[in-house]
Image (cartoon, rainbow, N blue to C red):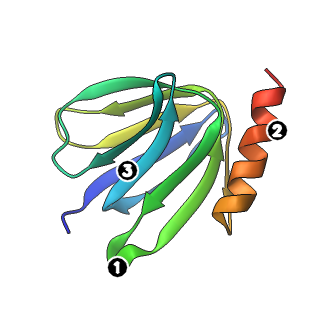
């Protein structure tokens, strides 16, 4: 599967930077995914669990706060969020994201 560069940036700096096969996030209109060669776009993010699929299907799980996800003209995906934390499992990320939603 085709790869594309992804970067997660919070106020503390770059949280993660690497290549991905897919990114799944939560926007104001619901869950959405981005894959290689996606059209340029900007989406408003709400607190939620973020899933990144690396090469070979390895999954990375993050809880992220509010922010934006931008697919740039060069096909790079940049997430600018007010909070981001990595977790070992999707369930842990989901629980942290739920707690973030209640803090709003």
Return the disc, 2 or 1, that comes first in the chain's sequence. Answer: 1
Q: CA distance from mark 2 to mark 3?
A: 25 Å
Query: Which numbered disc covers residue 99?
Result: 2
Which image quadrant for residue 102? top right
Which residue is at 59% across, 28% downward? 46
Of pointers 2 and 3, the one earlier in the residue sequence: 3
Outermost residue to the bottom? 56
> Is residue 56 found left or right of 7 in the rendered image?
left
Q: Residue at label 3?
A: 6
Q: CA distance from mark 2 to mark 1?
A: 31 Å
Q: Is residue 82 left or right of residue 73?
A: right
Front tag of 1 and 3: 1
The answer to whether residue 91 is left or right of residue 75 is: right
Identified at 24% across, 62% down, the residue is 3
Nearer to the camera, 46 or 74: 46
User: Can you say which quadrant of the picture contains the N terminus?
Assistant: bottom left
Point 17% across, 32% down: residue: 73
Q: Earlier in the sequence, mark 1 or mark 3?
A: 3
Residue 86, how many percent across, how many down?
66, 58
**Is disc 2 placed on a helix, strand or loop?**
helix
Mark 2 or mark 3: which is in front?
A: 2
Mark 1 to mark 3 CA distance (whole Å): 16 Å
Across and down, in percent, residue 70 comes to: 35, 31
């Amino acid at each position: 599967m085709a790869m594309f560069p992804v970067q997660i940036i919070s106020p503390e700096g770059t949280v993660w930077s690497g290549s991905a096969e897919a990114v799944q996030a939560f926007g104001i209109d619901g869950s959405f995914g981005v894959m290689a060669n996606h059209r340029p776009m900007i989406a408003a993010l709400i607190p939620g669990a973020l899933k990144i699929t690396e090469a070979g299907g390895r999954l990375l799980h993050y809880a992220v706060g509010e922010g934006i996800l931008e697919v740039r003209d060069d096909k790079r995906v940049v997430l600018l969020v007010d909070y981001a934390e990595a977790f070992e499992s999707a369930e842990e990320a989901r629980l942290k994201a739920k707690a973030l939603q209640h803090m709003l």
